[in-house]
């Protein structure tokens, strides 16, 4: 529901303003019209009340506002990847880069697993600043029929800025996976999001998550199993609009256990900062409550 003029004009313009002011302004300006914003805030508050009933109404309202502000700040990131971690842009505290550097020095390909959490693409940009280039695999972008013209133009600009900052390529699942397999085996790194979700996904696996079951695709674990490459996990935590912390950590060798660990980390992060997860709009599609145990028939042992 982002306004076309903000995609074509506003965010590209404010992303050129010096200092970290653009990221502070973004949270105030927002991505949506005033009417859309109010509707989204009320909807988010209602959802947070459902998922986190022990929190107060004031907390639900605060989380809803922080969620929309974070998404708007990521819009500025998308127009200014070249400024992340550099003078005049948001500062990045990168921890764990040595895990990716070690694999790169050994000529080993790897998958850097992210989730739709906080300013998520900060991690691969920070690694590129530390000398580790990565490619990224996503769902279809420019050929997605659900996108409008302004959204396509914005995403094209985002892709160009991202690949320039990370010194890699952007590849989508609609382009076929053979180049990804070959690249991983040749020693390159690929960024893939574990909590991506589309209604047409058929190979899903359930994970314990916030009292129920989060159904996620199994593509990463199948890709890692086939290529034999290790997996790393990275998460970004924004301490303020202009100060970001990125933590990179190794994952278990077994790809299935690795993704289990990634989802456990995501659950911990969401419990700590519910507003920072992007996927609340897909909550009712991705998440299912645990089935209620059937009572034992009377007289059964």
Image (cartoon, rainbow, N blue to C red):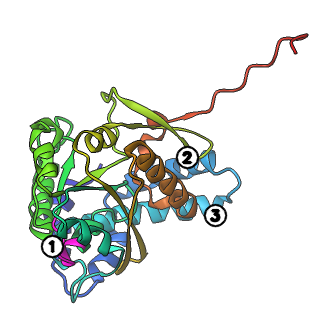
Name the foreground residue: 277 vs 217.
217
Residue drawn 38% across the image and 51% down it:
253
Residue assigned mark 1: 13
Residue 270 in view, yes or no: yes
Question: Which quadrant is the C terminus positioned in?
Answer: top right
Mark 1, Cα crowd under 10 Å, few <14 / some 14-19 / many 20+, is some
- What's the magenta region? 127-133
Residue drawn 12% across the image and 66% down it:
161
Q: Which of marks 1 and 2 is nearer the N terminus?
A: 1
Residue 164 percent coordinates (x, y): 9, 67
Residue 128 drawn in magenta: yes
Residue assigned mark 2: 47
Q: Is residue 217 left or right of residue 46?
A: left
Mark 2 to mark 3: distance in Å? 14 Å
The answer to the question of whether label 1 and label 2 lie on touching residues, with beta carbons closer than 8 A, is: no
Mark 2, Cα crowd under 10 Å, few <14 / some 14-19 / many 20+, is some
Q: Earlier in the sequence, mark 2 or mark 3?
A: 2
């Amino acid at each position: 529901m982002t306004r076309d003029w903000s995609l074509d004009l506003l965010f590209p313009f404010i992303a050129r303003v010096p200092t970290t002011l653009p990221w502070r302004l973004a949270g105030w300006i927002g991505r949506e019209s005033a009417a859309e914003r109010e509707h989204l805030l009320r909807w988010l508050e209602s959802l947070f009340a459902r998922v986190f009933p022990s929190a107060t109404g004031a907390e639900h309202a605060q989380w809803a506002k922080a969620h929309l502000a974070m998404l708007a700040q990521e819009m500025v990131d998308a127009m200014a990847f070249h400024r992340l971690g550099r003078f005049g842009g948001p500062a990045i505290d990168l921890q764990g880069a040595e895990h990716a550097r070690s694999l790169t020095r050994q000529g080993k390909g790897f998958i850097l697993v992210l989730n739709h959490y906080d300013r998520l693409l900060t991690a691969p940009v920070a690694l590129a600043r530390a000398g580790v280039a990565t490619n990224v695999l996503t769902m279809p972008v420019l050929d997605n029929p659900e996108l409008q013209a302004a959204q396509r133009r914005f995403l094209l600009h985002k892709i160009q800025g991202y690949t320039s900052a990370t010194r890699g390529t952007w590849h989508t699942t609609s382009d076929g996976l053979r180049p990804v397999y070959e690249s991983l085996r040749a020693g390159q790194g690929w960024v893939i999001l574990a909590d991506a979700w589309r209604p047409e996904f058929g190979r899903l696996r359930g994970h314990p998550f916030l009292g129920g079951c989060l159904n996620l695709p199994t593509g990463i674990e199948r890709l890692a199993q086939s290529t034999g490459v290790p997996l790393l996990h990275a998460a970004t935590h924004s301490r303020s609009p202009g100060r970001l912390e990125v933590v990179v950590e190794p994952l278990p060798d077994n790809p299935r256990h690795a993704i289990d660990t990634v989802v456990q980390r995501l659950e911990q992060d969401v419990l700590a900062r519910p507003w920072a997860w992007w996927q609340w709009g897909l909550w009712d599609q991705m998440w299912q409550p645990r089935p209620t145990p059937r009572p034992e028939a009377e007289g059964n042992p």
